[in-house]
Image (cartoon, helix red, strand yellow):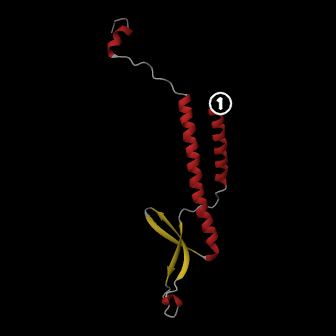
Amino acid sequence: MKATKTSNKENHVKKDDLVTALANCGKLMKGSLTRIRRRCGKSQCCCMSGQLHESLAVTYKEGGKSFCIYVPRHLHKQAQEAIADYHKLKNLIQQISQLNVKAFKDLARKQHIPKKTQIKSSDVPSLFGGKL
């Protein structure tokens, strides 16, 4: 029984640490950072000879549709951090959920009440002194 109490305390500490880590996930953005290569269309541009222009975009889905947001160079790092924070948040939520499931299972085992002996229909008259 002591091992279970220690385990519960450890799980509680882990959960507190995870919840604290949730607070550090400030900027969240669901999506993926995608490198786009394209031609600009100007006839004298180097992209017409094969050197395509590169840019970054965030792609995401909303309502079953895909969307794309151009990311200017000076915002590349911020976009990467926001997407990383989103994935970190999802991971933290999963870990907290796993700890909560384990704690709930332990609680259910501790509070388990065995089923009462089921009454057979043939025993009913004897329960009431033979009268119904």
Q: Residues within 10 Å of mark 1 (few under 14, many from 20)?
A: few
Residue 74 in the image, given as x and y percentages of width and height: 64, 75
Q: Nearer the viewer, residue 8 or 31?
A: 8
Q: Nearer the viewer, residue 112 or 27?
A: 112
- The quadrant of the rendering that contains the N terminus is top right
Residue 53 in the image, given as x and y percentages of width and height: 54, 83
Q: How many marks?
A: 1
Residue furthest front in the image: 3
| Residue at figure coordinates x 59%, y 46% from the top left | 96
Relative to residue 96, is residue 53 depicted above or below? below
Residue 38 in the image, given as x and y percentages of width and height: 49, 81
Relative to residue 3, is residue 86 depicted above or below? below
Relative to residue 120, is residue 5 depicted above or below? below
| Residue at figure coordinates x 55%, y 49% from the top left | 94
Q: Nearer the viewer, residue 123 or 37?
A: 37
**Could you tell whether 70 is left or right of 116 in the image?**
right
**Could you tell whether 88 is left or right of 39 in the image?**
right
Q: Nearer the viewer, residue 102 or 70?
A: 102
Relative to residue 102, is residue 83 depicted above or below? below
| Residue at figure coordinates x 33%, y 16% from the top left | 121
Q: Amino acid at mark 1?
A: Lys
Quadrant position of residue 132: top left
Judged from the image, the secondary structure of the residue bearing numbered disc 1 is helix
| Residue at figure coordinates x 51%, y 84% from the top left | 52
Residue at mark 1 = 2
